[in-house]
Image (cartoon, rainbow, N blue to C red):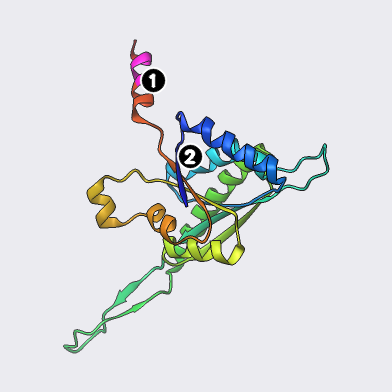
Amino acid sequence: METYVDAIGEEDTAATTTTETAANKNKKKLRMMVAIDESKNSFDALEWAVDHLRVVISAEPETGQEGGLLTLVHVHPTYLQYIYPSGGTASAMYATDSVPEPMRKAREETTTKLFTRALEICRGKMVKTETMILEGDPKEMICQAVEQTHVDLLVVGSRGLGMIKRAFLGSVSDYCAQHAKCPILIVRPPRETSTSSTKELKSK
């Protein structure tokens, strides 16, 4: 089951109310997973989650109830380098997934910056958080992580692709909506009308 909400929009209130009602009935704190990458959309999704779903994952010191857990997952796409044999006339080639040292260091630095930013957002909302780094096809690895960690909810950002690009490139959110073994919440980018209105006001 998938649910769509806007990072900024009317759906916020309805989704939050539904979540709070469920939490009050079950009195159970949830295990939640948020997939992050370098895109703004993934951080929109994280901020929406900690702002609107905090009630179902944060601890309650006044009642002594322990909190749930938010897992931040980041996937490194598999690196394939094609190598051609030197000398001779052979046209064969083979692929290796060994990552060159400069690229490996750059990737580690990028991942560290991602998690530093994400953890600051979570700490600001007093949410208990863990991090997970995987390697492979992002959409497949996210679904595997969901199944292995038994999370109650997966939150992902939508890239806002057009229909042609969506069909050609595929969509992590679409794939997870079909294959993840838990409910999924897809946070769409903020509406362009909101941005346009803000720009118009500034110009005036």
Seen as rendered, the residue at the extreme top is 204
Q: Nearer the viewer, residue 10 or 172?
A: 10
Is residue 201 covered in magenta?
A: yes
Task: Decide if residue 124 is on the left or right side of residue 87.
Answer: right
Task: Decide if residue 120 is on the left or right side of residue 177.
Answer: right
Q: Residue at x 51, y 32 (%)?
A: 12
Q: Are marks 2 and 1 in contact (CB under 8 Å)?
A: no
Q: Nearer the viewer, residue 113 or 2?
A: 2
Q: Which residue is mark 2?
A: 44
The C terminus is located in which quarter? top left
For mark 2, give the secondary structure: helix
Up-down relation of residue 14 to residue 4 (above or below): above
Q: Amino acid at mark 1?
A: Thr
Q: CA distance from mark 2 to mark 1?
A: 18 Å
* Residue 83: x %, y % from top left: 30, 78
Up-down relation of residue 132 to residue 67 (above or below): below
* Residue 23: x %, y % from top left: 66, 42
Residue 6 location, quadrant:
top left
Task: Decide if residue 90 is on the left or right side of residue 139.
Answer: left
* Residue 143: x %, y % from top left: 49, 62
Q: What number of labels is visible?
A: 2
Q: Amino acid at mark 2?
A: Asp
> Where does the magenta region start and end?
197-202
Residue 198 is marked as 1
* Residue 151: x %, y % from top left: 60, 57
Q: Residue at x 39, y 68 (%)?
A: 79
Is residue 160 covered in magenta?
A: no
